[in-house]
């Protein structure tokens, strides 16, 4: 396999290459991010994407775990490890839903809006797709201890995978989680604890944890599971394969996704540039990355300061000045959508590249819009966590702006499960009547005596 896959620095002025077994997570020559690259001429690429339909139809979970994994059933398109070495816990068996009722609230016709529920992964978020790939590498490298900084879902996913994966020597893997003080949804923290992760609550925000875990990983020999690990993004490419498969391999007009550390949007751009390069699709959808107003560095840099990837380059000095000014001002990221409460996204250059590949836009939405977006998914679909509500809020905003037209086929990616952060949901709906509630779709519980006549008054005949 070694000759098919390698790692390459994303900077076109450097382009240094490394073997896939070197776990450095940044270019040793210039410090840029690394990509996983394939020599497709040595891989066995199907002639048409419909190849994957037969496999999906034939696979049953327990008898063929690799074929029924929503990640590994596309393994020809991420060929960095042989089939008998792939780690899977049943990730990527997600749901794709037509959302006609939700679409109708914005005057959008039927068969135009779709929701991709990544919250139906085993640990309840899309992170499982990336973990399947990154744990495959950890195992191959003989590593036993894995670590991540997390706003919650990365740690939940990593902790679950660690418990269900044995290292090369047959011992269980050990998970070490770095979470920032007080910034984690209860459901997510509960998962890390339940799955036995060593959980370190660090004084500081996510960005501080991220810097710390990178240093700790290097000094203490922990395998890093954040999305700077390029194998994470290989796993996350498969979200797009599943969306395409649901649409009979016809690309939609738009993909809308929330942006925090910008791993997903980076992976999606890579998906489409590779599929185009391989001649497996003829059109690339547009990308909309949605950030929270209180955690909007990508929006500020792209839409306000005009930072842009062009022919492999972008103006890094504008980016550096922006972040050093923010640090001087001591401004912290703050949003109800804790999964995207990130001030300094590690994948920023790759995300810029995705915007170029997918002719993308970035928008910011308020916490109020995020909560209404989330409530709409609850009211008309299977529900989602706050950060995922940003997708729907962003779609709504872009339809109002006319950037997305009402005839466009749009897929909103819902990144996490509704039960991750019930405190926010309860708060939105208002705990009890008498409570002041301003939210558009609030559905308050009604205090009621144990009396059928009174119940009839409330619910009607
Ligand atoms: C991690 C996460 C995000 C952010 O994704 P990035 O790839 O870091 O941009 C969004 N929503 C949820 C639920 C998450 O867990
Ligand atoms: Zn480099």
Image: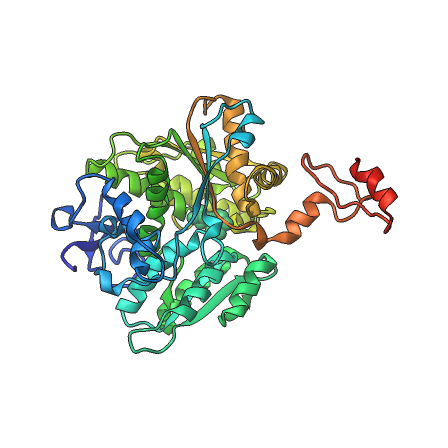
Please name the colour scheme applied to the rendered image: rainbow
| Residue, far left | 41
Residue 68 placement, left or right of 366: left
Asked whether 136 or 334 is in front, the reply is 136
Rendering quarter of residue 278: top left
* Residue 64: x %, y % from top left: 30, 59
Q: On the rendered image, what quadrant is the N terminus found in?
A: bottom left
**Percent of width and height locating residue 183:** 59, 57
In the image, taking residue 319 as reference, residue 445 lies left or right, namely right
Residue 67 visible in rendering: yes
Residue 35 placed where, x, y %?
Answer: 27, 50
In this picture, residue 398 sits left or right of residue 222: right
* Residue at (42, 66) in percent of width and height: 147
The relative height of residue 394 versus residue 265 in the rendered view (above or below) is: above
All told, the count of numbered labels is: 0
Name the image quarter holding residue 122. Answer: bottom left
Q: Nearer the viewer, residue 356 or 415?
A: 415
Residue at x 49%, y 61% (from the top left corner):
156
Q: Position of residue 379 (x, y in %)?
A: 61, 38
Quarter of image, res 279: top left
The answer to whether one can see residue 11 in this image is no
Whether 231 is drawn above or below 455: the answer is below
* Picture quarter with the C terminus: top right
């Amino acid at each position: 396999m070694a000759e098919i896959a390698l790692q390459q620095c994303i900077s076109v002025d450097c382009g240094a290459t490394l073997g896939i077994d070197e776990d450095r997570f940044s270019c040793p020559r210039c410090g840029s991010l690394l990509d996983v690259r394939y020599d497709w001429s040595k891989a066995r690429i199907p002639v048409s994407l419909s190849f994957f339909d037969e496999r999906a139809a034939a696979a049953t979970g327990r008898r063929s775990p690799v074929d029924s994994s929503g990640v590994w059933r596309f393994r020809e398109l991420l060929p960095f490890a042989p089939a008998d070495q792939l780690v899977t816990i049943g990730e990527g068996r997600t749901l794709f839903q037509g959302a006609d009722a939700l679409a109708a609230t914005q005057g959008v016709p039927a068969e135009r809006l779709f929701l991709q529920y990544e919250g139906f992964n085993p640990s309840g978020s899309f992170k499982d797709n990336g973990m399947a790939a990154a744990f495959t590498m950890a195992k191959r490298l003989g590593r036993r201890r894995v670590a991540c900084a997390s706003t919650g879902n990365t740690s939940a996913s990593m902790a679950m995978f660690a418990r269900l994966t044995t290292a090369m020597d047959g011992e269980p893997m050990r998970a070490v989680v770095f979470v920032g003080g007080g910034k984690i949804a209860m459901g997510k923290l509960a998962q890390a604890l339940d799955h036995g992760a060593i959980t370190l609550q660090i004084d500081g925000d996510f960005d501080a944890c991220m810097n710390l875990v990178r240093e700790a990983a290097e000094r203490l020999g922990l395998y890093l599971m954040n999305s700077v690990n390029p194998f994470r993004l290989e796993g996350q490419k498969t979200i797009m394969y599943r969306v395409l498969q649901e649409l009979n391999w016809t690309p939609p007009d738009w993909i809308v996704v929330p942006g925090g550390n910008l791993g997903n949007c980076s992976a999606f751009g890579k998906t489409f540039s590779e599929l185009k390069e391989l001649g497996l699709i003829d059109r690339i959808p547009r990308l909309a990355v949605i950030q929270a107003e209180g955690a909007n560095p990508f929006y500020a840099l792209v839409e306000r300061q005009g930072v842009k990837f062009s022919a492999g380059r972008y103006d890094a000095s504008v980016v550096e000045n922006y972040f050093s000014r923010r640090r001087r001002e001591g401004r912290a990221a703050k949003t109800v959508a804790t999964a995207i409460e990130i001030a300094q996204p590690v994948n920023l250059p790759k995300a810029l590249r995705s915007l170029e590949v997918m002719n993308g836009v970035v928008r910011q939405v308020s916490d109020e819009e995020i909560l209404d977006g989330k409530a709409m998914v609850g009211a008309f679909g299977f529900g989602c966590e706050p950060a995922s509500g940003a997708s729907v809020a962003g779609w709504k905003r872009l339809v109002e702006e006319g950037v997305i037209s009402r005839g466009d086929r749009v897929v909103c990616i819902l990144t996490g499960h509704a039960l991750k952060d019930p405190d926010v949901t309860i708060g939105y709906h208002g705990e009890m009547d008498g409570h002041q509630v301003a939210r558009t779709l609030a559905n308050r519980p009604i205090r009621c005596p144990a009396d059928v006549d009174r119940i009839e008054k409330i619910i009607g005949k």
